[in-house]
C-alpha cells in the first residue's frame, strides 16, 4: 500500500510532527510504515536498541525515536540514495543524536556485528521469483534477491533472546515468513490484519510480531475503508488521521 493518509507532496512528507524530504530515487513513504509505527508502541515497552532494516527515507527510524524516548536506532539500507536521504532527514530532526544510518544490507550487517537488538523492524522486500513490480525505486525496495528463509536466518542472529522482530507484509505472503520464523525458533505472538473493505474475504496487509516464546498469539483485525476513499471511523481514529 503506497498511498498515505498524511500530507504527501512530491518533495516532502509529514505525519505527527515528523517532516521528511522525499526523492524520486527512493521509495516514498506509504501506509505500511505508518501502520507498523502505530502498532508497535501498543505492544512493546521501552526497547533500548532498535534495528530498522531497509530504512529508505528514514521514516520508521524517526517514528521509533519519537515513540521510544530512551532508544537508540541503527537504520540500515544498501541503497546509496536511500542512505543519503535518511541521513538528511534524521540529521534535521530532534532525534539526530539517537539515530545512526549505515549503508549496508542485512546480510552484510549480520556478518559484521556482534550486537543484539531489543527490537528489529522491517518492511522487507517480498517479491521473490516473481515478475518485478515496477521500475526504479519500487523494484529495488520490493523485490528480494534473497528468500524469506535467508532473511529470517539473518534476522534471528541479530535479535536478542528476550527481544521482538516486527514486520509488515502483504497478507498473501505471511505463511512463508511465519514458517521460516518458526524454523528459527521465532513465533508470532501478535498479528493484526488490515482489510481494505468490509466485504473483503482476504486481508491486504498484515503486521506480525515475533519473539522466542511459543504461546497463543494475540490476533486482531481492522477494516480501512467503508467505501472508496472514505476511511472507517475505527481506522481513522486508530491511525490518528
Image (cartoon, rainbow, N blue to C red):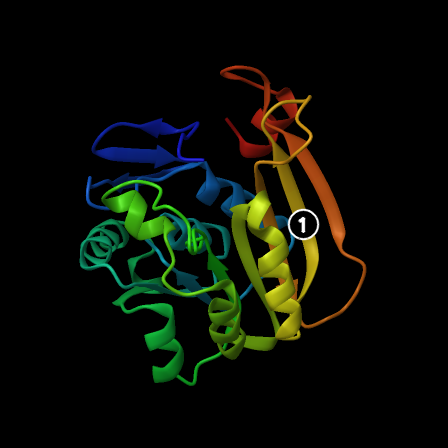
- In the picture, residue 238 is in which quadrant? top right
Q: Residue at x 63, y 21 (%)?
A: 233
Q: Residue at x 23, y 40 (%)?
A: 22
Image coords of residue 217 (percent x, y): 76, 56
Q: Is residue 167 visible?
A: yes
Relative height, residue 20 to residue 4 (above, below) = below
Q: Secondary structure at mark 1?
A: strand
Relative height, residue 58 to residue 202 (above, below) = below
Check disc 1: other Cα within 10 Å, few if <14, some if 14-19, many if 20+. some
Most distant residue in the right direction: 216
Relative height, residue 88 to residue 157 (above, below) = above
Image coords of residue 13 (percent x, y): 30, 35
Residue closer to the observer: 161 or 174 = 174
In the rendered view, does 228 fall on the left or right side of 220? left
Image coords of residue 143 (percent x, y): 36, 52
Q: Is residue 58 visible?
A: no
In the rendered view, does 161 fall on the left or right side of 111? right
Residue closer to the observer: 170 or 163 = 170
Which residue was labeled with disc 1? 191
Amino acid at each position: 500500500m503506497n498511498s498515505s493518509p498524511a500530507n504527501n507532496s512530491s518533495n516532502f512528507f509529514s505525519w505527527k510532527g515528523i517532516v521528511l524530504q522525499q526523492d524520486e530515487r527512493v521509495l516514498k513513504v506509504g501506509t505500511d510504515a505508518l501502520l507498523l509505527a502505530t502498532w508497535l508502541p501498543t505492544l512493546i515497552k521501552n526497547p533500548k536498541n532498535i534495528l530498522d532494516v531497509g530504512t529508505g527515507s528514514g521514516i520508521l527510524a524517526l517514528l521509533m525515536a519519537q515513540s521510544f524516548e530512551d532508544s537508540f536506532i541503527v537504520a540500515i539500507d544498501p541503497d546509496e540514495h536511500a542512505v543519503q536521504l535518511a541521513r538528511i532527514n534524521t540529521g534535521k530532526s530532534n532525534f539526530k543524536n539517537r539515530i545512526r544510518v549505515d549503508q549496508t544490507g542485512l546480510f552484510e550487517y549480520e556478518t559484521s556485528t556482534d550486537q543484539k537488538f531489543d527490537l528489529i523492524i522491517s518492511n522487507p522486500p517480498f517479491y521473490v521469483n516473481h515478475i518485478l513490480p515496477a521500475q526504479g525505486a519500487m523494484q529495488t525496495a520490493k523485490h528480494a534477491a534473497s528468500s524469506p528463509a535467508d532473511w529470517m536466518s539473518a534476522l534471528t542472529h541479530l535479535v536478542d533472546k528476550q527481544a521482538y522482530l516486527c514486520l509488515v507484509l502483504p497478507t498473501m505472503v505471511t505463511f512463508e515468513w511465519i514458517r521460516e520464523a518458526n524454523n528459527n525458533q521465532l513465533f508470532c505472538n501478535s498479528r493484526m490484519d488490515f482489510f481494505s473493505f468490509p466485504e473483503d474475504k482476504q486481508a491486504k496487509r498484515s503486521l506480525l510480531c515475533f519473539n522466542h516464546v511459543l504461546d497463543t498469539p494475540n490476533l486482531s483485525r481492522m477494516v480501512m475503508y467503508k467505501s472508496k476513499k472514505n476511511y472507517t471511523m475505527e481506522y481513522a481514529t486508530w491511525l490518528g488521521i
